[in-house]
Image (spheres, rainbow, N blue to C red):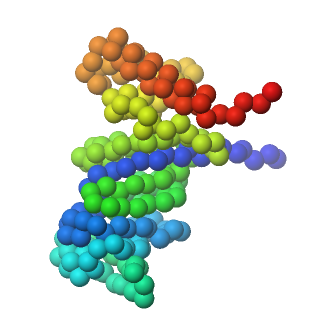
Amino acid sequence: MTGVSTAMIAVDCSVTSFLLNGALAAAPEMTLTVAPGQLFSTRPPVLLFWAGGDDFSRFEAALENSSEIAGVCVLDDESDERLYRVVFSDESRLRSFYALLRESDALIRTATAAHPRWHFELRFPDENGVQTVYHWLRGNGFSVEVHAVSRGRRRGSDLRTLTSEQAETLLAAYLRGYFAVPRETTLDALADEFDVSTQACSERLRRALTALLEGVVRNEKWGT
């Protein structure tokens, strides 16, 4: 019996004011790097991360005073960085986020933060997971900027070459199934979502795809 191999979808994105807002605002030069290989524990939700670059006393005081945090422990403080284990409350948004990732069979490849943004490299087995997490973030009021989307080992085109309107329209078209066969949405529906004319929506998609293809053509090594 032959197994089915499915290429993971890689998503590179930034989310504004996602977690630890007060602590990062209290020490705005602090940078956080989430330790790899963590389980998406939701009872309680726990996050391990390295921090460095600013005043630890201000940062830790803000952590202790945060309503979303139930406990803080410093695991390593023998260098310019400190390793923290932070236990979040059951009402925190991290618990819902972890639950979504588990339901979607998603992976966090990397996660970093510097006030006011978090940067994630996520991996999903299919488009449904991408769509679920994206809409949860937007539905909870977070500003989400998607920088790149790719499948498998192939490096994706960089969405940062696009305008914000082009990137949002192209991502929505992808997530709604506009490029699927058969199509799962229409150009009219996408235009209604962004409150623009069908012609304007079509021009956004065409310009976005042209910009991405130009980047591929410039960067690809063509064989003979």
| Closer to the camera in the image, 182 or 203 | 203
* Quadrant of the image containing the C terminus: top right
Residue under the image location 28 percent in, 25 percent down: 194
Q: Quadrant of residue 55?
A: bottom left
* Residue 79 % position (x, y): 42, 84
* Residue 147 % position (x, y): 43, 42
**Farthest top residue?**
199
Q: Is residue 48 left or right of residue 192?
A: right
When the figure is inspected, residue 80 is found, relative to residue 96, above or below; the finding is: below
Q: Quadrant of residue 56?
A: bottom left
* Residue 116 % position (x, y): 27, 57
| Closer to the camera in the image, 216 or 10 | 216
Q: Is residue 142 left or right of residue 182?
A: left
Residue under the image location 50 percent in, 22 percent down: 210
Would residue 157 be visible to someone looking at this image? yes
Would residue 129 be visible to someone looking at this image? no
Residue under the image location 61 percent in, 28 percent down: 217
Q: Is residue 195 left or right of residue 51?
A: left
When the figure is inspected, residue 110 is found, relative to residue 219, above or below; the finding is: below
When the figure is inspected, residue 78 is found, relative to residue 15, above or below; the finding is: below
**Farthest bottom residue?**
78
Residue under the image location 49 percent in, 46 percent down: 11
* Residue 1 % position (x, y): 82, 47
